[in-house]
Amino acid sequence: MTWLITGGAGFIGGHVVRQLLDAGERVVVLDDLSTGDAARLPVEVPLVKGSTLDRDVLDEAIREHAVEGILHFAAKKQVGESVEQPFFYYRENMAGLQTVLEAAAEGGVKRFLFSSSAAVYGMPDVDLVTESTPCAPMSPYGETKLAGEWLVAAAGKAYGISTVALRYFNVAGAASPELSDTGVFNLIPMVFERLTAGQAPRIFGDDYPTPDGTCVRDFIHVSDIASAHVAAAKRLAADPAGETSLVLNIGRGQGVSVKEMLAVIGEVTGHDTTAEVTPRRPGDPARVVASADLIEQELGWTARHDVAEMVASAWDGWCSRHPEARKA
């Protein structure tokens, strides 16, 4: 099959492109390169530079490349920014998604995979978050992901499109340095940035109702995220058009606290990760850990990489851009 990957020059999209190619699939990428990097893409992958809001560009890409399925990654994803700019997030994430779905429906595309997020759950008060855990997003970003899932399912039902929505938990690591995340918005790169500057990492609150008082999260290697997409794409390709409608978590089902992650980072990097404790950030739940049972049942998929592999690969990518970070 030929897959159009929106946002395919991004951190996660770039990993999925590589794994789909390795699986023998044909790929074309649409990306406006506002946060993506064309250097992540193999030379043989066609790149259409454009916005998901541009229907003409989408129609031409689907027609020219005979697209049979779409993997939709393109979206804005910073929680804090979404609170400050809700109109921008709803336009980019919801209007962009609607435009892509309209192009898919009119272009005869019958397979659609939507990049969602654990942000749809908000602050779940459960040990393991299942796909049936009530959703209560706490930001416009999370709202656009939940509403996006609803729109994808509705379009699938109305137009005979098979759909899968994948809810990511905390993505980390890199398959290779050139594919690594260049943003500094998540725990691991935030710690790397502080260590590189000779500063102590920060812990935002150590008085949570968890074993060591710090927040607990489900971290998953980006290569595992990518392999889950390949498994979902294969499922969509194998099932008759319009017969699949799935919403699945992608996680390891194992919680790691902030203090535990700092200890791993110290072991991998050789840096002192003794932290400075600062007040809690508003809206941070104490524990968010996925149940990964349903994705194993539906797709036969399980995560393979552990936390040390995530940190080591992320560190290699960081040091490729910040060589001064590596201790002599």
Image: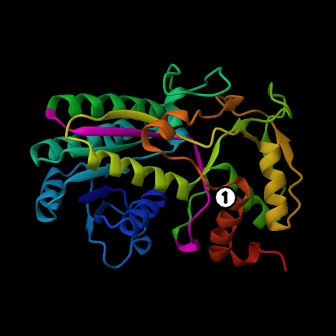
Tell me if residue 186 comes above or below residue 269 in the rendering.
above
Quadrant (top left/top right/bottom left/bottom right) for the N terminus = bottom left
- Residue type, mark 1 in image: Met
Query: Which residues make up the magenta segment?
Result: 159-178
The colour mode here is rainbow
Look at the image and say whether residue 164 sits in the magenta stretch: yes
Q: Secondary structure at mark 1?
A: helix
Quadrant (top left/top right/bottom left/bottom right) for the C terminus = bottom right
Q: Position of residue 228 (x, y in %)?
A: 46, 50
How many dots with numbers?
1
Location of residue 42 by image quarter:
bottom left
Q: Position of residue 325 (x, y in %)?
A: 75, 72
In the rendered structure, the answer to whether residue 194 lies left or right of residue 159 reads right
Tell me if residue 237 comes above or below residue 30 in the rendering.
above
Tag 1: Cα neighbours inside 10 Å, few (<14), some, or many (≥20)?
many
Look at the image and say whether residue 64 sits in the magenta stretch: no
In the rendered structure, the answer to whether residue 164 lies left or right of residue 28 reads right
In depth, the one of 64 and 162 nearer the eye is: 162
Q: Which residue is mark 1?
A: 310
Q: Position of residue 253 (x, y in %)?
A: 64, 38
Residue at 61 percent of width and 23 percent of height? 124
